[in-house]
Image (cartoon, coloured by chain):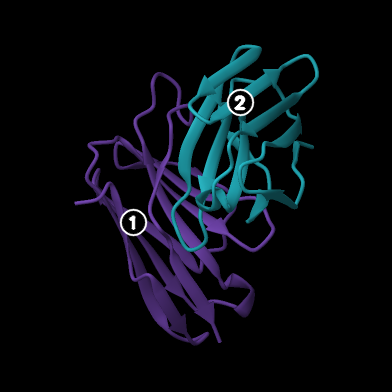
Amino acid sequence: ETGVTQTPRHLVMGMTNKKSLKCEQHLGHNAMYWYKQSAKKPLELMFVYSLEERVENNSVPSRFSPECPNSSHLFLHLHTLQPEDSALYLCASSQPTGDLNTGELFFGEGSRLTVL
Amino acid sequence: GQNIDQPTEMTATEGAIVQINCTYQTSGFNGLFWYQQHAGEAPTFLSYNVLDGLEEKGRFSSFLSRSKGYSYLLLKELQMKDSASYLCAVVDSNYQLIWGAGTKLIIKP
């Protein structure tokens, strides 16, 4: 098993659909993250979970809903998205060395989302 | 506001050396990361600098000057497989990662 696995790799959905992105990490890390990556823009942090508890939500619209049932799994539930939400959604995990966000991030290959 | 600046795109020749610069203005500093991302793949960790100076790791080196708010990634003996985007990210005083938009490096034979 590779370190961080994301499914699906590609997703096309209409604005009224409901879908979910899944992330699984096999590294024994305590922290998991959702990032949005748009072309020629910096990575945008969406959500952070530490020990299954959400510790950060960077003012993400409510049409994105995260879920972290255990330290190995992270979901991003999608509902009534907009075309501007089309992007690559990256999941990452880390084992912080003392302070959150200072550990090396291990990324999944991303889910490429297209909203029609 | 907080800002990370990197060139959008660079081109270099196979076998040559290239330096990718990153300048930052952040509220505090607790380290700087470089990641490599091949097209369609996950970003992967390259280096972490928290003290001034040069860190060498094989063909790749990363330099940091905290007083100048400046870092660079140096790639030697370039290979075609080095064609990728290189992401600079700074850890600020709140231990948040501030990301640059990335530099797309194109290697030509």
Image spot of residue A32 (x, y percent)? 37, 44
Q: Residue at x 56, y 31 (%)?
A: B33
Q: How packed is label 1: few (under 14 Cα within 10 Å), some, or many (20 or more)? A: some
Horizontal side of A39 relative to A101 (left or right) equals right
A36 lies above or below A32: below
Q: Residue at x 57, y 58 (%)?
A: A37
Q: How many marks?
A: 2
Q: Residue at x 52, y 61 (%)?
A: B39
Q: Chain of mark 1?
A: A
Which one is in front, A104 or A76? A104
Instruction: Kindly identify which numbered label has been placed on residue A67.
Output: 1
Q: Is residue A38 left or right of residue B57?
A: right
Q: How far across and how far down the image is residue A39, in percent?
A: 65, 63
x, y percent for residue A35: 50, 53
Q: Which chain is purple?
A: A
Q: SS class of the residue under badge 2? A: strand
Q: Residue furthest left?
A: A1
Res A93 → quadrant: top left
Residue for badge 2 = B62
Q: Is residue A107 above or below residue B33?
A: below
> What amino acid type is highlighted by mark number 2?
Ser
User: How far apart are the two marked residues, 2 and 1, measured between alpha carbons?
Assistant: 36 Å
Q: Position of residue A4 (x, y in %)?
A: 31, 50
Q: Quadrant of residue A26?
A: top left
Tell me the cyan chain: B
Q: Chain of mark 2?
A: B
Residues behind callouts 2 and 1 on a single chain: no
Observer-nearest of B22 and B60: B60
Q: Is residue B99 above or below residue B52?
A: below
Look at discs 2 and 1 and give the one toward the viewer: 2
